[in-house]
Each structure stands twice: as C-alpha cells, then as structure tokens.
Amino acid sequence: MTTTSPAAAATEITPPRARAMPPPWRLPLATIAAAFVASLLWPDQLGLVGRIATTALLVLSLDLLVGYAGIATLGQAALFGVGAYGAGLFAQQVHGDPLLGLLVAAAAGACLAAASGAFLLRFEGFTLLMLTIAFAQILLSLASTFRGLTGGDDGLSDFTITPILGLWEFDLEGRVGAIYAVTVLAAGLYLSRRVANSPFGLSIRGIHESRARMAALGTPVRKRLIGIYALSGMLAGVSGAITAQINGIVGLDSLGFPLSAEALVMLVLGGAGNLSGSVIGASVFTLLHHTAASIDPYHWLFVIGIALMAVVLFPPAAMAQKVWARVRGTRNTTP
Amino acid sequence: MTEILRLDELDRRFGGLHVTRKVSLALRPGDRLALIGPNGAGKTTLVNQISGVLPPSSGRIFLDGSDVTAQSQAERVRRGLARTFQITTLAPHLPVQRQVELALFERERLGNSIWRSIDAFTGVADEALALLGTLGLAHRADVATGSLAYGEQRLVELALALALRPRVLLLDEPMAGVPKADGPVLLAALDRLPADLALLIIEHDMELVFRMATRIAVLVQGELIADGPPDAIRNDPRVRAAYLGH
Amino acid sequence: MTLLLNILVDGVAYGMVLFVMAVGLSITLGLMKFVNLSHGAFAMAGGYGVAVLVGSHGWNFWAALLVALIATGVFGAALEALILRHLYRRPELQQVLFTIGLTFFLVATANAIFGPQVRSIPLPASLSGSVDLGFRTLPTQRVFVLLAGVAAAALLTWIIARTRFGIWIRASVDHADAASGLGIPIRLVQCLSFGAGAALAGLGGVLGAELMPLEPYYPLKYLVLMLVVVAVGGMGSIPGSLCTALVLGTVDTASKYLVSEWGSLLFFVAMGLLLAWRPRGILTR
C-alpha cells in the first residue's frame, strides 16, 4: 500500500478511485437472457431474433470504430460482405462446416481491415469517411464484375451448410439459426468488452479523445488504430458469414452503401461508445422496420425518418439525464 | 558529463517564414534550462521539432548520442523524452486516474495487452494515485479531466510527463494561465524533480525562471541570441535590448 | 475518333450536371460546415417540379423551369432558416443522422405525392433536335446542358469574385467567427447561399433527368455521387467542384462506353486516388 501522510491518516480519507470497468460477462448474459425471453414470447419469430442478433454483431463491430476509436466510417459493408462471400465460397469450394466458415470469414475480415486500414487510416474526418465509401464501392464493383465467382446480381447460392458440430442443422423455423446467431453475438460482446476494458482499449479511447496527447506519451497511434480496425473487421466478417450461412444466399447488397449507412444509423440510435448500444439500436431499428415495412415500404421511410430527426432533436441520453436530475433534485444530495 | 540532448543547427521554414534559424543547443543531465523570448519568437515551434511533432527543414537532433531527427514522437518518448503542451491536450472524458494510467501503461509497454482488465493492474493504479498525490490531485482521481480547473489540468499535464520517467523533459509554459493560488503546488512539484533530469522550460514568468534556472537561453525571431547562466543573461546588452523590458 | 468525341461530349455533359447539382452542397459545407445529406432532395424537387408542370399541366418548359427553380430555392431557404440552422453547432454525426432522417422523410413524401414510378421530363421542341456544328452534330439537349453548366459556373464565379455578397461569402468561409463581428449579416448570407445552392441542385435535377431518372429514391441513389464531387473538389471550392465533376464525369462515361462490365469501378478508383493525393481538395495543396 502507499504511505499515507499525517494529514490523510488523521482524517482517514481514502482517495476516490476511478470507477471500475464493467465485468465482461454481464452484457453477453443479459443479451442471451433477452433473446431467450423474446423467443418465449414470440416463438414464431425466431428468424427475426436471429436477424437482430446478426445485425447487432455488425453494429457492434462499428461501435468499436465509431464509438471507441472515433473513426467515422461508411464502408463497414465491405468487411461484412467479404465475410459473407468468404463463408459462402468456402462452403461451396472447400467444406460446408459452418464453424470453419466462421473462422475463414473472421480471418478474411480481419486481414482486409488491417490491409485497408494501413492506407485509409492515414486520413481523418470527412476525407476518411469518403475514402471508406470509395473502398466499399470498389469492392462492390469487383464483386459485380467477377460474377462467375460471386454470382453477380443473382447472388451466390449454390452452397450447402452442414449441421453445426454435426448435430444441429439449420431449420426453416430459424430456431437453430437464432441460437447460433445469439451465441456468436454473446461471444463477440464478451470479446469486445474484454478488449474495451484492457490497456489497449483504454489507449484507443485516449486516441479518440486526444491523438496529440497519446503520441506524446509514446503511443504508436497508427498501429493501435489498425489493430482495432482489424478486430472490427473480424466481427463484421463473422456477422456476414452467419447471415450467409443462415440465409443460404449472399447478394451484392452485402457490400452496398445502404447497409453501411443503416448500421451507422442503428449505432447512433442505440448509443455509441458503450457496446450495449449496438444491441439496443439493432433491436429497435429492426423491429421498427419489420412492423412498418409490412404495412408499406414507404411507410417505413416516414417512420424511420421522423424517428431519426426526433432522436437528434431530443436525444434520449440527454432526456434521460434531465429526468434523472429531476428525480435526484427531490432528495437532499451532497454536492 | 555527456550531453543528453543536442540540437545541431536546427532550421525550419514555413514558405517565406523563417521560424527557426540555425539553433544549436546542448543539455546535460541535471541542467535546468529556461528558454525565454518575446511572443512569436518560435519557442513552441522549437519544442515541437525536438519532440517530433514537426520535422525541421535542416539540422539534427541527438538524444543521448543517437540521431533522432528522423524518428517519430513515440520513438523519442521511448528514448526518454517527454513534454507538456501549452494548450491542454488532455482527454476530456477520461477520469484523471485513467489518464495517468495511460501514461504508465505506455511506459511499461503494456499498451498492446488486450485481455486483462485495467483494474487488474493494481500496481499501475497505485502508482497513478501516488503520483497524483504528490501533486495534490489525489482527491480528484475519479473526476473527468475536462471538468478540472485549469490549474489542476496543468498539474495533470505535468503528472503525465513525470509518469513516463523521462531523462529529458520539455515544459511548455507550465505556469501559463494558472491561478496564483495553485502556483505554489506547481512550483513545489518542479522543485522535487529528479536531480539528474535535464529540463528545458519555456516560461514568461520571470520569477520562476530566475528561481529555478541554472541556465537561460534567449530566442528572438527564431534565433538563439544568448545562452548562459542567469546573471550573465541579466546583464547581456543584446538581451536587454531585445527583450528584457517586460 | 467518333467514339472519343462521343465520350467527351457525354462526359462533359454529365460532369456539368454533377457540378450544378453538387456545387450548392460544397458551398454549404464550406460556409456553414454543415453536413447536409438531404441535398439530393433539392435536385429531385426541381426535376419533379418541371416534370409535373410540363407533363401534367401542359406548361411551357421554360416557364416551368423558372418557377420550379425559384420554388426549390425558396424551399431550401425555408428549410435552412426554420430547421437546419439550429443544428450548426451540433457534432457532425448528429448532422449526418438528422439529414439522413430528413432525406428518408422527403423520399417518402415524394412517393406519397408523385407515386413510385419513374418520371421523365418532356423536352420542348427547341431542345429536342440536333445542332449542326459543322464537323459533327450534337443533340441540342447536350449543348443546352453544356451551356447551362458554363453559365452557372461563370455566374457563380462572378458573384463570388465581384459582388459584395461574394465578399461576404468568402469572408464567412474563411473566418466564420470573425465575420459577424465585421458587420457581415451572416444569417442572411447563410440562408441565401443555401437557397441558391438548392435552386442550382434543382437545375441539375432537370438537366440530368435523362441520365438520372426521377423517382422517389432519387436523393438516396445519388447521394454518394454528390458527396464524391464535394470531397474531391474540396469543400467550399467552386472551381474544385467544377474540375472534379468534369474529370470524374468523363472517367465514368468513358468507363460505361469502354468497359461497362466494370460498372463504377474506375469512377471510385479515380476518386480514391484523387482524394488520397489531394485530401483538402483537388485544387488545394
């Protein structure tokens, strides 16, 4: 223990410590519990649960970049798509085992992210944003051109996925798919929380808030950013793989700009920078879409348009804080 | 004693502006060098070149005998160079303790550790709190650095530089904007710096300069016009003419 | 040789359309530092305005064009004054989010009013034929687009360089905080510039209706194109936008003629290279 000065010993004040980091198992368990409850309440909507979980994984990958590292990107679909096509092609050409496919997609996503990050992360702000868009569009064009490989506009679909661990086959009701997706999401959340809590994660937050300071502390800033970019790419690739495996088809929209934009919207809706926002945002957005779109596709645009504008004008976090302050104000609190 | 920092004809231009004119300077361990000069003389620009933020147009920089002119900031820090900034560059939303822990993690080369939680590194936390304690900031450890008073923020800047256990420390106007009340704590911290640390301090506060400097260098319009012990500088006619009329 | 000329003519025409559509966005970004992703809606509004007035109500094309542009400009100015200007101090991500939401809303509105089908703009007889230049003939429409683009660029350059308003704009772009202290009516400058940019976008929507058909999803479909012109050209730079639009427009057209199976690959590769080479704008160091 540190030595205490006479003054401190006399008053017996222990210095306040910074708040401890949240335990890594909390969010994954909460997510699994929520998914379980949802599957009990709506047993015929397991496909939807699976979709929300896969989407949440993509949004989680984006949170690591946008929320933690402060890197705004509209090209996340590139990493998602590479994972999706990677898993599909692997099943088609090599082996249909889904878990192996996940590994392939994880590696593909991580490698592509690291390679592109080495170039892209030389830039910042709006320039970086536009370059991520360009990168994803270039990949999209390539996928469209090499339609012998990717199936082009028709998509990649003649591959079969063998049962998971030889036991569980993907069924039409989506039960196996949902459990699969939620499990992988939980693992992803656990991994992300561990990284966020680590010295590496702390340095990423430091880079986000003050690059100049971190450089002056001896941080190899670019290398760290490439590292978090690779992790993000890995999760996005896995998300793509699960989508491909559950749906049995990979389309060009996996690489499209709308997917990147939607992921960003979901992240900001749910709250960036604390990991749980990805699950919340993905759930709210997907449920809204599901409900509104079944009425009329353009209806959906009205709903989401107004919701987005409302969230910006009346941010939930600020609203919640105001409510909380009101509640606190009614009691006697010491400053 | 060997020099720990040496500048060889450091020169820097910005288009037509000649901001650093062939500056040569050497620091030995234990030196307390105050760099003074009128506003716009190029003092911060010089420090930016030494720390690696800005590359010089020509000239060389040696740290402990090695040529570091082409090396990055991070590499120079690893060789024992640390600096503070004139404008606070602290991460506003991080608690003070975490900000100091960041410096410690970098020093210990733990920045690439991705699995263990920062709370598991109790030694680091203890050292961070102890360091903050020596600067009178222990009671603010859990406060976001952006919420600190300006004087406290300057102290945190100093804490970060000290956490790195540097051999050469560059302080860019540590007293600037600090309220009178917080002055003594900062001064006491500066007094307690390790004796073998080489210190280069940019300051306008002449009381501080004459109190702690063993050497004074005078920079005017990018040129070093004088470099010597305080008494010699005080009486140097060129310096009086150019500057000491504050 | 004919092929090369065709590429050049179509490419420059396409470039002019891109320029006219995107220049307002560039000015807004440079002037107010406001990321307005709903800019494409103005192009759509102008296009729909003319399509409806001429197609459904039998108006004269030129009258419809004038009315549609004025209406779009007023719409833009009103949007800026009533809603958008409250967001100037918000972080970029919030501006992005809000304007995306606004875009979705306007897309849905367009569908509600005009229906989901693609609309075309019936051209008047004066623009339907060809112009004989001696060494070859060109569709009159292309010539009109070229002239309109040049006129717009010239008019903008003249305003910026020679008028009081132009000085106000330049001062506000370069020194936003100081500008109001200098007595520049900054709110007026912002509002009028926004409205003018919207009207120009509307013109672009009309000019480009052949290549970029009018439909409710228009603002989302062509958003990336406009962002590209602004990013590569440099925010707030009119010559930069013009140069970028012409270069990239020609690259894309050439690509469509020569290697159509590659899609937009060359366009985005060219864009990436240009942006990486000159991140602050193609004409800025």
Image (cartoon, rainbow, N blue to C red):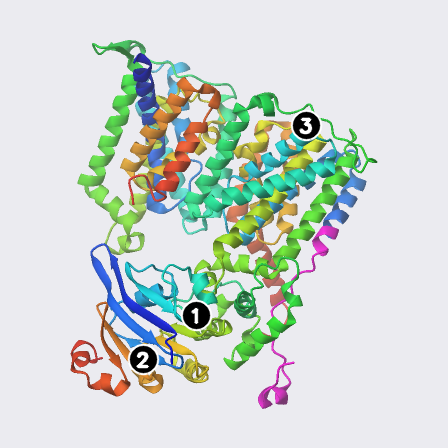
State which quadrant residue C65 falls in: top left
Label drawn at residue B82: 1
Residue assigned mark 2 = B205
C29 with respect to A77 (left or right): left
Mark 3 vs mark 2: in front:
3
- The residue nearer to you, when weighing A311 against A167, is A167
Q: Is residue A62 above or below residue B91?
A: above
Q: Nearest the camera: C285 or C13?
A: C285
Q: How far apart are the alpha carbons under marks 1 and 2?
A: 22 Å
Mark 1 and mark 2 on one chain? yes
Instruction: Decide if residue B6 is in sight here.
Output: yes
Quadrant of the image occupied by residue A57: top right
* Position of residue C29 measured from the top left corner of the image (x, y, whole percent): 36, 43
Q: Amino acid at mark 2?
A: Asp
Q: Over which residues does the magenta segment extend? A: A1-29
- Which one is closest to the eye, mark 3 or mark 1? 3
10 Å neighbourhood of mark 1: few (<14), some, or many (≥20)?
many
Say the numbered circle drawn on residue B208.
none
Give the quadrant of the C terminus of chain A. Answer: bottom right
Badge 3: chain ID: A
